[in-house]
Amino acid sequence: MIKLTDVLNEIGDASAKPYKYKVADEIPNEEIVYEFTTKSKLKYVINIAHYEINRNKTRLMVAFKPTTGNYDTITNKGEHFNIMATVVAAVKEYLAKVPKATEISFTPSKADENDDRRANLYKAYVAKQLPGSKVYVLEDGRYLVDLPKKKK
């Protein structure tokens, strides 16, 4: 019998391949917008911005959506693993440009108030792709990922 925990452990293991993505727009040292198209021809954008909270803390804000929707749009086309792999690849690319980043903020879409499926998917990806990070839920529903400390 397959257990849910086994499935969640497989999520984010990098077996899903990212779609090819490209820079669509950029404000140097502030924000970048990537775009990609899924196998079902749905176009997506990934927005990643960063700002300094204080001298020791820089936050990346990550959001993605289909170009025909908003950040709450749920598509359910069965492409979520490849989409997540693409978002992870773009975030890692951006992190290389902003090595002082200490945390990432994101807000998962929900079908209703009690729907935590996407949040659980995102947290599983974070755990696999950014070992040593810690995920917290803020009061406003956003998630905050404390990135592992970089070795000097």
Image (cartoon, helix red, strand yellow):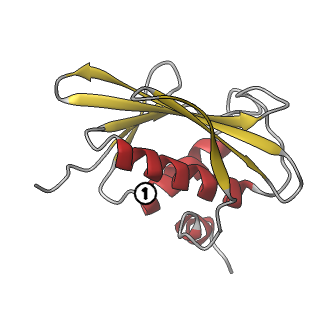
Q: Is residue 115 in view from this perspective?
A: no
Q: Residue furthest left?
A: 152
Q: Residue furthest right?
A: 40
- The quadrant of the picture occupied by the C terminus is bottom left
Q: Nearer the viewer, residue 99 or 141?
A: 99
Left or right of residue 35: residue 144: left
- The quadrant of the picture occupied by the N terminus is bottom right
Left or right of residue 120: residue 55: left
56 above or below 46?
A: above
110 above or below 140?
A: below
132 above or below 49?
A: below
* Residue on which the image places disc 1: 127
| Amino acid at pointer 1 | Ala
Percent of width and height locating residue 29: 39, 29
Percent of width and height locating residue 43: 81, 43
Q: Nearer the viewer, residue 105 or 45?
A: 45
* Mark 1: secondary structure: helix
